[in-house]
Image (spheres, helix red, strand yellow):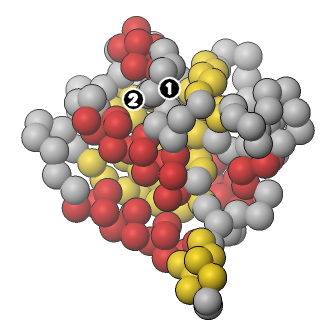
């Protein structure tokens, strides 16, 4: 059974921390360490852990690129979802699993901040779940547009962290916290 905080049952949702996704991501070693901090906290509090893996033409199932970073502490007691779209909810059984577990607050982290983390964060809120984005446990790569135009990864991460703090949805909460500050 998942841990409750102020009447909220939580689940830890770890999205796309796959070798091919994070190999050249910003601050990836620290992000992996922070995800492991959150995994340890979740296990100590008996909070369910849900791993999401993206599959497409570049992340082919069962290849080295598709596999979850081996530094992360997985367990056979965890739940696994395979997806093919940015949002972890699209054409998956994630929503049904979260409802089965009695979860109404998602604690989110992973990669890539500007694609699958953003899409999953909004999809969580749109489905009525409370959300906490772990601000130092998601990452991405810088976006290069040519002619010297670059949006740095650290700025993409900062923008999403700021947005999640301020976006509003009725009858639900959203926040960001650092891994060492968050308690289940």
Q: Secondary structure at mark 1?
A: loop
- Which residue sits furthest top? 100
Residue shown at the point (45%, 27%) measured from the top left: 90
In the picture provided, is 18 more to the left or to the right than 110?
Answer: right
Location of the C terminus (image quadrant):
top left
Q: Is residue 84 left or right of residue 176?
A: right
Q: Position of residue 20 (x, y in %)?
A: 78, 48
Task: Say if residue 72 shows up in the picture.
Answer: no
Q: Residues within 10 Å of mark 1 (few under 14, many from 20)?
A: many
Crowd tier of the residue under label 2, counting other residues whose Cα lies within 10 Å: few below 14, some 14–19, many 20 or above: many
> Can you tell which mark lies on residue 18?
none
Q: Going by the picture, which residue comes out furthest to the left?
A: 170
> In the image, 158: left or right of 128?
right
For the image, the number of numbered tags is 2
CB under 8 Å between discs 1 and 2 = yes
Relative image position of residue 97 (x, y in whole percent): 46, 14
Q: Position of residue 34 (x, y in %)?
A: 63, 54
Above/below status of 69 relative to 105: below
The numbered disc on residue 47 is 1
Which residue is situated farthest in the front direction here? 147
Q: Which residue corresponds to the image point at 22% horizontal and 56% vertical from the top-left?
A: 167
Task: Looking at the picture, tell me which residue is in the foreground, 160 or 130.
Answer: 160
Q: How far apart are the alpha carbons under marks 1 and 2? A: 6 Å
- Who is closer to the viewer here, 18 or 171? 18
From the viewer's side, name the closer residue of 15 and 175.
15
Asked where in the image residue 107 lies, by quadrant, the reply is: top left
Q: Position of residue 138 (x, y in %)?
A: 56, 56
Residue beneath disc 2: 10
Q: What secondary structure is marked by label 2?
A: strand
């Amino acid at each position: 059974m998942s841990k409750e905080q102020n009447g909220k049952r939580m689940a830890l949702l770890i999205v796309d921390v796959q070798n091919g996704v994070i190999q050249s991501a910003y601050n990836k070693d620290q992000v992996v360490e922070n995800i492991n901090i959150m995994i340890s906290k979740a296990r100590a509090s008996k909070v369910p852990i849900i791993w999401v893996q993206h599959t497409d033409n570049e992340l082919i199932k069962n290849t080295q690129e598709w596999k979850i970073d081996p530094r992360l502490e997985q367990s056979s007691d965890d739940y696994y979802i395979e997806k093919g779209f940015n949002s972890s909810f699209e054409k998956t059984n994630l929503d049904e699993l979260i409802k089965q577990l009695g979860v109404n607050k998602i604690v989110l982290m992973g990669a890539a901040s500007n694609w699958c983390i953003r899409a999953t964060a909004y999809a969580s809120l749109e489905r009525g779940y409370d959300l906490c984005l772990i601000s130092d446990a998601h990452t991405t790569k810088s976006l290069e547009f040519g002619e010297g135009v670059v949006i740095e990864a650290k700025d993409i991460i900062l923008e999403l962290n700021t947005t999640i703090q301020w976006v509003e949805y009725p009858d639900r909460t959203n926040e960001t916290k650092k891994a060492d500050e968050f308690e289940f």
